[in-house]
Image (cartoon, rainbow, N blue to C red):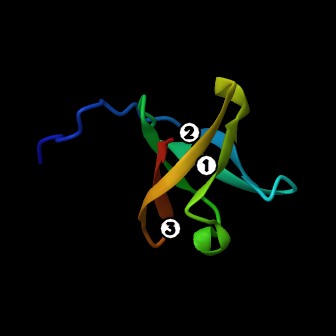
């Protein structure tokens, strides 16, 4: 199947932190990163809201993101 995304994705495996309420931190895995978004896995996303702050220390990234796709074991997010 041909890639239909405008921005190319780069496979990666990074540790991320979903920041909830400025207090609670939910660890996650960051995969398939692009300039505008990424796929997150490895967490219980049932309690994660539609928008939140994602912190990826290795990339010195701390961005507000919005969930655009929810799967059984992962979510797709875009940077807002």
| Secondary structure category for the residue under label 3 | loop
> Counting residues from the N terminus, which is met first, the one under dot 3 or under dot 1?
1
Residues packed near mark 1 inside 10 Å, few (<14), some (14 to 19) or many (20 plus): some
- Hey, which quadrant is residue 27 in on the image? bottom right
Residue 13 numbered tag: 2
Taking the spot 67% from the left edge, 46% from the top edge, the residue there is 53
Q: Would you call the spot at circle 2 few (<14 residues within 10 Å), some (14-19), or many (20 or more)?
A: few
**Residue 29: mark in rendering:** 1
Q: Earlier in the sequence, mark 2 or mark 1?
A: 2
Cα separation between marks 3 and 1: 11 Å
Mark 3 or mark 2: whose residue is earlier in sequence:
2
Which residue is found at the position 62% from the left and 66% from the top?
49
User: Which type of secondary structure does the marked residue at label 1 adopt?
Assistant: strand
Q: Quadrant of residue 21?
A: bottom right
Kindly indicate whether the residue at mark 1 contacts the one at mark 3 (C-beta within 8 angstroms). Answer: no
4 displayed left or right of 40: left
Q: Nearer the viewer, residue 73 or 55?
A: 55
Report the number of numbered marks.
3
Q: CA distance from mark 3 to mark 2?
A: 15 Å
Residue drawn at (43%, 68%) of the image: 71
The correct choice, above or below, for 28 with respect to 59 in the image is below
Give the structural element (helix, strand or loop) at label 2: loop
C-beta proximity under 8 Å, tags 2 and 1: yes
Q: Which mark is residue 73?
A: 3
């Amino acid at each position: 199947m041909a890639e239909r995304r405008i921005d190319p994705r780069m496979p990666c495996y990074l540790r991320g932190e979903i920041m909830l309420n400025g207090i609670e931190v939910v660890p996650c895995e960051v995969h398939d990163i692009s300039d505008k978004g990424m796929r997150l896995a490895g967490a219980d996303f049932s309690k994660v809201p539609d928008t939140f702050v994602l912190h990826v220390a290795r990339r010195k990234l701390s961005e507000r993101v919005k969930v655009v796709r929810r799967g059984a074991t992962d979510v797709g997010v875009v940077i807002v």
